[in-house]
Image (cartoon, grey):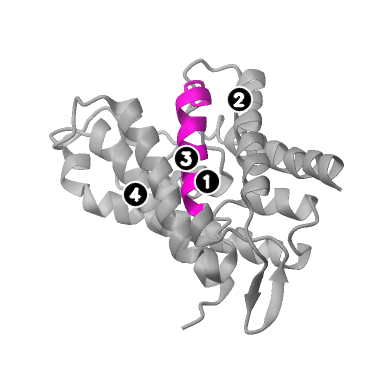
């Protein structure tokens, strides 16, 4: 069976957010098995493995971008068709929304037990440790730059769908592990400032889901929400351009 590349991006991003949002819920919500564990080590590791699993499952069908900043960076590097960019963006956003909603349903009893709204919001979207928009923006940009720049060097063979090449970049199944390790490293080394969204769909989609939850005191922090969108787009596009200058 050959999946439509857009549907593969939708499924892959949903899997990514199910595991990613799930691990944050596991350590931040009340009365879970992992409550009180060493959260940053667990969270960064789980996000890295979530990327590995998601990329492994969908790489053969879409190249496994699973991130609008990655898609934009590859297009800027001439490694992905601009015509496919809007469809990938939409699929990734909807997949992120589905994945975070499934994680919410999985932990719904624990959400009901958790009164600290900041902890609840953290299971859906990111926020700064110190609110300084300029530095927060740079943090998201540099983290995403390293993700896209690294992925461009990890890239495997061309991706073809039904005999027609849709892009001249693709993450093969063997490339999934180093990309997962890269995300793990970014989280451990650079993620302490903003929670390392490094993915506009990963942050914006779940933030929308949180906004519509039936909670009395919810605060989606829309004043900050532009940072994990603009920062990753800046970092991803810069990585694509720098890669082009260095390699071509």
Image position of 99 with respect to 210: above or below: below
Closer to us: mark 2 or mark 3?
3
**Left or right placement of residue 138 versus residue 124 in this view:** right
Rounded to the nearest angstrom, the CA distance separating label 2 from label 1 is: 19 Å
- Residue under the point 32% across and 37% down: 24
- How packed mark 2 is, by other alpha carbons closer than 10 Å (few <14, some 14-19, many 20 or more), is many
- Asked if residue 20 can be seen in this view, the reply is yes
Q: Is residue 171 magenta?
A: no
- Residue under the point 35% across and 54% down: 101
- Residue under the point 51% across and 77% down: 3
At mark 4, the secondary structure is helix
Residue assigned mark 2: 139
**Left or right placement of residue 159 versus residue 4 in this view:** right
Label pair 4/1, CB-CB below 8 angstroms: no
Which labelled disc corresponds to residue 96? none
Which region is colored magenta? 176-193
Residue assigned mark 1: 179
Sequence-earlier tag: 2 or 1: 2
Sequence-earlier tag: 2 or 3: 2
Closer to us: mark 2 or mark 1?
1
């Amino acid at each position: 069976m050959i999946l439509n590349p857009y549907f593969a991006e939708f499924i892959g991003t949903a899997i990514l957010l199910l595991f990613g949002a799930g691990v944050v819920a596991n350590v931040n919500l009340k009365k879970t098995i992992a409550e009180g564990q060493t959260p940053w080590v667990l969270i960064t590791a789980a996000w890295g493995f979530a990327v590995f699993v998601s990329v492994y499952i969908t790489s053969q069908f879409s190249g496994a971008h699973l991130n609008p900043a990655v898609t934009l960076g590859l297009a800027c590097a001439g490694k992905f068709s601009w015509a496919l960019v809007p469809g990938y963006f939409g699929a990734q956003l909807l997949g992120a929304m589905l994945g975070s909603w499934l994680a919410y349903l999985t932990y719904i009893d624990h959400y009901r037990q958790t009164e600290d709204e900041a902890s609840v919001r953290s299971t859906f979207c990111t926020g700064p440790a110190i609110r300084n928009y300029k530095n927060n923006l740079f943090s998201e940009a540099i983290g995403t730059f390293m993700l896209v720049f690294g992925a461009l060097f990890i890239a495997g063979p061309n991706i073809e769908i039904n005999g027609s090449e849709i892009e001249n970049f693709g993450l093969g199944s063997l490339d999934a592990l180093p990309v997962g390790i890269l995300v793990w490293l970014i989280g451990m080394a650079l993620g302490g400032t903003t929670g390392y969204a490094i993915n506009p769909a990963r942050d914006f989609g779940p933030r929308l889901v949180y906004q519509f939850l039936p909670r009395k005191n919810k605060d989606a922090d829309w004043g900050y929400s532009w940072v994990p969108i603009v920062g990753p787009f800046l970092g991803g596009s810069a990585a694509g351009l720098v890669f082009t200058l260095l390699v071509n």
